[in-house]
Image (tube, rainbow, N blue to C red):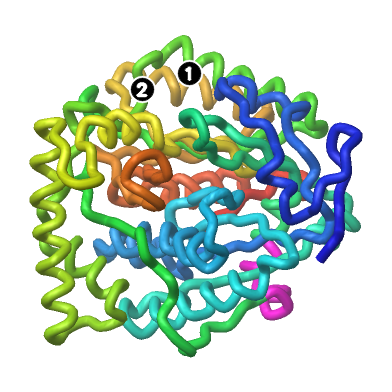
């Protein structure tokens, strides 16, 4: 408490560091390391991921894996009582940056979520905390900036080798115990606002392509130039590549999705309370589906305004130590993207992984029904989890791999 950091010549309390950062308007700006800011050394990198998520996905449980990744963020946001927390959704987990004052409440919420995941879903949610100061001592950097989604709403973007290093420390069997936050069934995790009611988003152009590309350049300047090449290529080649569109976004009616949300809300898998909650979710979804389709208003919910902000408030493109994208592409566009990435990989500039499916998944974090809501996007049927797995295999094929370039993979 009382600790400050300096930004722009001014002293800023470290807890307010992220809130005080300016947001960038253009995604192309994020390929420039100059727009990122050093995270205070007193902060912590928090990593969550579903252990053996690849096997769970192959068993048809990707919706549960995906929702647990989003639940990691929801639990922390609710525990801290504010939505402006730096986080990045990774498909089967999440990365968060937390001030020291916020860490105890966040750890408690995540420990409870891990216990619930095991008890209710039979899935192991790994949670690890790595001090930024330790990463800095090793010579890594941890930096953050914001991408504006709409006025007053932004998402965090991460830069530097510190986050990939933190992921390795949390996941490596030789170091994991030092950073682990054990599951603790001491109460229900705070999951208000978590929603998994949307139908999968079908591709309008042919395929949904999940991409993870990691620059292997030796310096931040060279890495930035490589990312800029990718972003500029994609913006030129795919000007309408967003996976969400007015014609495809539909509030869902799948009872399995309602049951999953009811399970996480009630901390039960059956019984009267679970049934009543599932029924309530189904009714809410039916009403919202019609309000959104008609652009109508009911109470405090404006279907037209919500739909317009929905199209803006998605995270289909982001940086978290690597470039992550979910794009709606035609077969020809997909082939061009792969050819371009293969060229960069052949030059030794990147290593990458992709996954193709016919739809994308949409999971929500809802603070209010007007402006304060975010929707996480991942490819259906594996998405980022399989893309990371393929990138890891490709990286292993390289004889000399820079330590700072090792990615997160399940």
Magenta span covers which residues?
Answer: 168-179
Residue 169 forms part of the magenta stretch:
yes
Task: Label the magenta part by its dominant secondary structure.
Answer: helix
Q: Position of residue 230 (x, y in %)?
A: 56, 21
Q: Is residue 2 above or below residue 357?
A: below
The residue closer to the viewer here, 374 or 44, is 374
Residue 346 forms part of the magenta stretch:
no
Q: Residue at x 64, y 27 (%)?
A: 30
Q: Quadrant of residue 200?
A: top left
Q: Quadrant of residue 278?
A: bottom left
Q: Which residue is mark 1?
A: 234
Q: Residue furthest front?
A: 299
Q: Position of residue 388 (x, y in %)?
A: 50, 49
Estimate the spatial distance between the alpha carbons at disc 2 and disc 1, rounded to whole Å: 9 Å
Q: Residue at x 42, y 57 (%)?
A: 70
**Given contact means CB atoms under 8 Å apart, are the residues at marks 2 and 1 in contact?**
yes
Graded by Cα atoms within 10 Å as few (under 14), some (14 to 19) or many (20 or more), the crowding at tag 2 reads many
Q: Which residue is mark 2?
A: 241
Q: Is residue 31 above or below residue 399?
A: above
Secondary structure, mark 2, is loop
The residue closer to the viewer here, 363 or 77, is 77
Q: Is residue 216 above or below residue 300?
A: above
């Amino acid at each position: 408490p009382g600790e400050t950091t300096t930004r722009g010549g001014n002293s800023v309390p470290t807890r307010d560091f992220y809130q005080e950062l300016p947001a960038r308007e253009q995604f192309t700006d994020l390929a420039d390391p100059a727009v990122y800011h050093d995270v205070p050394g007193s902060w912590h990198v928090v990593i969550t991921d579903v252990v053996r998520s690849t096997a769970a996905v192959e068993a048809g449980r990707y919706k549960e894996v995906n929702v647990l990744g989003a639940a990691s963020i929801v639990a922390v946001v609710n525990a801290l009582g504010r939505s402006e927390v730096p986080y990045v959704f990774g498909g089967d987990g999440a990365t968060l940056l937390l001030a020291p004052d916020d860490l105890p409440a966040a750890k408690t919420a995540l420990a409870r979520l891990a216990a619930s995941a095991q008890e209710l879903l039979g899935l192991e949610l790994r949670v690890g905390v790595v001090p930024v100061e330790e990463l800095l001592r090793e010579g890594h950097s941890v930096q953050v900036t914001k991408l504006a989604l709409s006025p007053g709403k932004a998402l965090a973007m991460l830069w530097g080798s510190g986050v990939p290093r933190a992921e390795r420390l949390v996941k490596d069997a030789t170091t994991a115990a030092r950073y682990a936050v054990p599951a603790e069934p001491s109460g229900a995790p705070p999951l208000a606002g978590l929603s998994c009611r949307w139908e999968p988003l079908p591709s309008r152009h042919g395929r949904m392509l999940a991409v993870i590309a990691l620059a292997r350049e030796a310096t931040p300047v060279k890495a930035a130039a490589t990312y800029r090449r990718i972003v500029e290529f994609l913006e030129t080649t795919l000007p309408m590549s967003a996976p969400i569109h007015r014609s495809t976004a539909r509030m869902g009616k799948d009872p399995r999705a309602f049951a999953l949300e009811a399970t996480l809300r009630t901390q039960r898998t059956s019984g009267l309370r679970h049934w009543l909650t599932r029924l309530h979710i189904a009714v809410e979804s039916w009403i919202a589906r019609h309000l959104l389709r008609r652009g109508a208003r009911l109470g405090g919910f404006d279907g037209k305004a919500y739909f317009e902000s929905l199209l803006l408030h998605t995270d289909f493109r982001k940086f978290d130590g690597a470039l992550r994208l979910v794009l709606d592409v035609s077969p020809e566009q997909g082939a061009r993207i792969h050819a371009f990435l293969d060229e960069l990989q052949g030059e030794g500039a990147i290593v990458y992984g992709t996954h193709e499916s016919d739809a994308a998944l949409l999971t929500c974090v809802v603070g209010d029904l007007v402006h304060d809501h975010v929707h996480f996007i991942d490819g259906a049927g594996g998405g980022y989890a399989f893309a990371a797995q393929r990138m890891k295999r490709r990286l292993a094929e390289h004889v000399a791999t820079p330590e700072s370039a090792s990615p997160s993979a399940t």
